[in-house]
């Protein structure tokens, strides 16, 4: 049976690009849309199905694009709408779909909507944002910003407070206002009409809050700042689900489009509700792996938990890295093992049931870079703490270590190159695309091989999942679609392990250790520390 193209977002693999850091084409040290277009060949060679572009819309860049000043444009730093159209057309010609980041919870304080809203209490756009009188001299309630300090900013001119769940430059939009809802639906249509294949929706669980804006209760577990409260009133209000059905109806006006929500809740039961009855999100990010230690039992527990909770209309997602958390090659780094753990992690991510999201650079094992305080760019370094800066996971892509700035920024006609917006930093030798493409045993080739295996075997891209018994330290499972069966064993432990695989003749498969030979029978797998194996049976 052939795959249904409408389900590309279930069967395919998505790849996140942080536009500032992928490829600079115009030589200003910041990545751009034309740069991404020039690198589509890499993505096609790798074998991903779709990309997700972090925001490229006009923005004062207080939060590097997550503060949007015009939802329907392109920031000059990244190019023009024509550049976007060219990128989209070329991606489509190569069989790659393109999804966009859409930031509905808040805009920039420079967005014309907010400028108008702020101008007067009587402004027609006043209620497009959340304005309230203070309580005495203080803010309207006790909510705190995710990025530190109170979530309210006083506006002296109109003597009211506006809500900002993030920076004060990111005022929250009022989704209880039908005019705002209609305007935002038009934003989606603008990009869908241009041919965008879908959206990643920023902090979608925050667009509905308690209408009475009640105080959050303290966290009985203690803590200070954001962690010192239980977030029962400032996010995840049940009314979010009606808003999601409205968004879904807009997406459904167009064929084969999808939306994935950043549901930054670590309760998988809550995340699972964002699929509705198949009439809300197509996908909801499950970030549970971001908090998993390097431990087979921990990963198995997270997978089993979500498999049990995921509604029949839903479909899991799996993420190891993104632009907000330290890269997993660093989180799980064991210098004695080289990239062995990154290989096991890749095999797991690409063989589970669910849509994997890759983060640019993970295919070459990029590590986090330690950024000197004076070069830090992320506002969190200022509003929270330098140790919480996200710059380390946002450094430029490493294309070719033999080229200036690893090929991230071009050599100008006068033979100079721009200083990249973040330093490339030290990385283990061979952490670049050119070197790894030359080396058939590299991590990059393993990603490519895993993607190809997954694509050509329905058991791997759409089959059922069940855990297999395995010794301590090993995570083993089976995928099955019709008569096709694949079995996977991943040794997270520090000792060799023998895993029973249930028998059967092996048709094909992959081992994480370069040069390892595959068994011809799936009876047992003998795995060294940080080794994994996937076998597709005959
Ligand atoms: C989540 C995004 O991933 C993050 O980068 C951003 O700072 C916040 N949402 C606010 O938009």
Image (tube, rainbow, N blue to C red):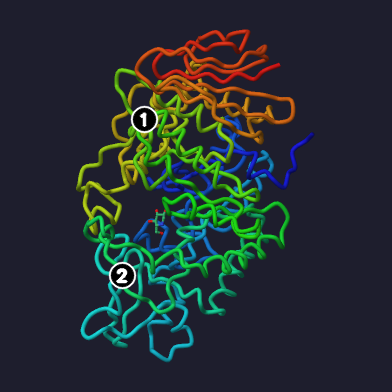
Q: Earlier in the sequence, mark 2 or mark 1?
A: 2
Element under disc 2: loop
**CB at mark 2 closer than 8 A to ligand 1?**
no
Taking 60 as reference, is 432 above or below it?
above
Q: Residue at x 55, y 8 (%)?
A: 517
In the rendered image, which quarter contains the C terminus? top right
| Left or right placement of residue 439 versus residue 4 in this view | left
Which residue does the numbered mark 2 point to in the structure image? 143
Callouts 2 and 1 close, C-beta under 8 Å: no
| Left or right placement of residue 277 versus residue 370 in this view | right
Taking 473 as reference, is 526 above or below it?
above
Q: Is residue 82 visible?
A: no
Q: Residue at x 60, y 42 (%)?
A: 50
Q: CA distance from mark 2 to mark 1?
A: 34 Å
Mark 1 closeness class: few <14, some 14–19, many ≥20 residues within 10 Å: some
Element under disc 1: loop
Q: Is residue 7 visible?
A: yes
Q: Residue furthest right?
A: 1
Q: Residue at x 26, y 69 (%)?
A: 150
Give the x, y percent position of residue 197: 64, 52
Give the x, y percent position of residue 27: 42, 44
Q: Residue furthest bottom?
A: 122
Mark 2 closeness class: few <14, some 14–19, many ≥20 residues within 10 Å: many
Q: How many numbered callouts? A: 2
| 132 and 408: which is toward the camera | 132
Give the x, y percent position of residue 186: 61, 70
**The quarter of the displayed image where residue 163 is located:** bottom left
Give the x, y percent position of residue 320: 44, 38
**The quarter of the displayed image where residue 418 is located:** top left
In the rendered image, which quarter contains the N terminus? top right
Which residue does the numbered mark 1 point to in the structure image? 294
């Amino acid at each position: 049976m052939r795959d249904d193209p409408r389900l590309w977002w279930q069967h395919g693999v998505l790849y996140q690009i942080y536009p500032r850091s992928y490829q600079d084409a115009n030589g200003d040290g910041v990545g751009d849309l034309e740069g991404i277009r020039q690198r589509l060949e890499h993505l096609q060679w790798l074998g991903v199905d779709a990309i997700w572009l972090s925001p490229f819309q006009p923005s004062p860049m207080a939060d590097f694009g997550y503060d949007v000043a015009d939802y329907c444009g392109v920031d000059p730093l990244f190019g023009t709408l024509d550049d976007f159209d060219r990128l989209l057309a070329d991606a489509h010609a190569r069989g790659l779909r393109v999804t966009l980041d859409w930031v509905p919870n808040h805009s920039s304080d420079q967005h014309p909507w907010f400028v108008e809203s702020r101008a007067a209490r009587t402004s027609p756009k006043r209620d497009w944002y959340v304005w309230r009188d203070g309580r005495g001299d203080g803010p309207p309630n006790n909510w705190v910003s995710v990025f530190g300090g109170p979530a309210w900013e006083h506006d002296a001119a109109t003597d009211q407070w506006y809500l900002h769940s993030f920076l004060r430059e990111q005022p929250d939009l009022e989704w209880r206002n039908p005019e705002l809802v209609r305007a935002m639906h038009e934003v989606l249509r603008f990009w869908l009409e241009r041919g965008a294949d879908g959206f990643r929706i920023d902090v979608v669980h925050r667009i509905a809050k308690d209408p009475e804006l009640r105080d959050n209760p303290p966290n009985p577990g203690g803590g200070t700042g954001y962690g010192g409260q239980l977030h029962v009133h400032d996010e995840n209000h049940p009314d979010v689900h009606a808003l999601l059905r409205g968004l879904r109806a807009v997406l459904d006006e167009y064929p084969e489009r999808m939306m994935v929500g950043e549901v930054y809740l670590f309760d998988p039961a809550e995340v699972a509700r964002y699929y509705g009855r198949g009439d809300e999100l197509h996908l909801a990010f499950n970030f549970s792996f971001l908090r998993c230690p390097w431990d087979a039992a921990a990963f198995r527990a997270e997978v089993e938990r979500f498999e049990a909770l995921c509604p029949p209309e839903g479909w899991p997602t799996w993420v190891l890295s993104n632009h907000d958390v330290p890269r997993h090659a660093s989180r799980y780094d064991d210098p004695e093992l080289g990239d062995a753990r990154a290989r096991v992690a890749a095999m797991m991510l690409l063989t589970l049931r669910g849509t994997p999201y890759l983060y640019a650079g993970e295919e070459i094992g990029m590590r986090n870079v330690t950024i000197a305080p004076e070069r830090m760019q992320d506002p969190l370094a200022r509003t929270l703490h330098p140790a919480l800066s996200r710059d380390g996971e946002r450094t430029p892509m490493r294309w070719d270590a033999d080229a200036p700035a690893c090929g991230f920024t071009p050599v100008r006609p006068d033979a100079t190159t721009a200083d990249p917006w973040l330093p490339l930093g030290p990385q283990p030798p061979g952490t670049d695309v050119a070197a790894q493409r030359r080396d058939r045993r590299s991590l990059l080739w393993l990603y490519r091989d895993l993607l190809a295996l997954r694509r050509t075997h329905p058991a791997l891209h759409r089959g059922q999942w069940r855990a297999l018994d395995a010794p301590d330290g090993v995570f083993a499972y089976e995928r099955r679609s019709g008569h096709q069966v694949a079995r996977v064993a991943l040794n997270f432990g520090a000792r060799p392990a023998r895993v029973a695989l249930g028998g059967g003749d092996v048709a094909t498969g992959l081992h994480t250790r370069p040069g390892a030979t595959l068994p011809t029978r799936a009876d047992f797998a003998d795995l060294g520390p940080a080794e994994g194996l996937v076998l597709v049976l005959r």
